[in-house]
Image (cartoon, grey):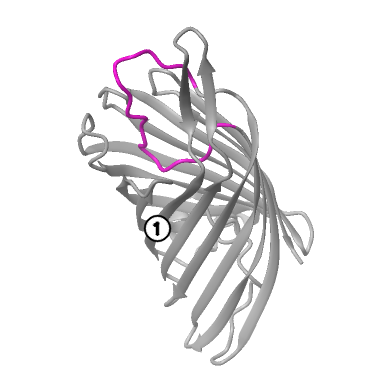
Amino acid sequence: MAPVHAHGSHGGGSELEAGEFDFTPLLTVEGHAGFDDNLEIPEKHYAADFLIGGEFAWGLGNDKQFSLSAFVGPALVRGGAEHFYGEIHVHDEEEHEAHPTRSRVDFKAYLEANYKHSDRLNVQAYWNPYFVTSDELKFHAEEGEWEKFESKGVKNELGAKVKYAFGDGDVDFGLGDSFSDLIDGAYVSVDHRQGWGVDGVFIGNYTDPRLGVGFNYGEIAFQIEGGPRFYTPGKYASALNSRTDWAGEIMVSRPVSDKVDFFAHWKFIHTWDNAEGWGDGYQHHIGTGITYKL
């Protein structure tokens, strides 16, 4: 997720006139946890991200705007590293254990190009590289063999997203708005992503069409969205077929001061596919942190 746009801390927050330029340096600190409970041997990871970067924005006139965002920093990881959705470990028929719970410092980055055509239509393209800093190995004394859980190298994710809002987004229950006003905060979006492992193997791709709504209660902003996830695995996972899962997200943010925003979010995915290496059940990702405008 983009720590700036996804958590409501977009740049300077004001419209730019044609030819006007703005740069906003930002620091995001987030603690998060992931739980892949649908797997036969459930996996989990915990991490703390420290990302520094900023947003360059140019006004194009008629409320249009183009911006570039870049963030980079360390991730303090305990357990498995972040991975592209749907990735499985292709093993032989021997028994394998869950990922060992060890600590490591990885590095991650986020690069995004964003075009705001109007208050209602927005287009994004992004790249998420993730650097695993060391191999994760465990020695099984009884078999006299090493088992590899992580490989050193760079994982890559590319994506593009289109979002269309039905209204102006100005819905505040703290000011007397009612549920009938939620149409002003409703939107639809389509997000497509593709992922590669550290060895360059294509993990797969998915497309998320979402219906969502955003609203405020005073200074607290809420965003709720959900929809099907159309997933297609890479050829490395011969046991998996294309499938349709269900995914959603709930986000909350609140300004703490003129420079600091607090945010929290919960992503959830349910899959019904009980294929080998996968499984019927839920995956969860929960995170919270702050974004500081330097």
Q: In the rendered view, does 185 fall on the left or right side of 233? A: right
The structure residue drawn at horizontal position 43% and vertical position 53%, both measured from the top left corner, is 156
Pointer 1 residue: 158
Find the residue positioned furthest to the front: 144
| Badge 1 amino acid | Leu
- In the image, which residues are magenta? 79-98
Residue sitting nearer the eye, 92 or 119? 92
Q: Residue at (51%, 24%) from the top-left corner? A: 99
Q: Position of residue 50 (x, y in %)?
A: 69, 51
Which residue is located at x 26 percent, y 35 percent? Answer: 237
Residue in front for this viewpoint, 198 or 23: 198
* In magenta stretch: residue 91: yes
Residue 3 as seen in the image, left or right of residue 273: right
Q: Considering the numbered disc 1 on the image, is that residue within a helix, a strand or a loop?
A: strand
Residue 143 image position (x, y, % from top left): 44, 10
Residue 104 in the image: state x and y as whole percent.
Answer: 64, 37
Q: Position of residue 9 (x, y in %)?
A: 63, 62
Q: Considering the whole magenta stretch, tell me its main secondary structure.
A: loop
Whether residue 173 is visible, yes or no, is: no
Q: Residue at x 64, y 68 (%)?
A: 54
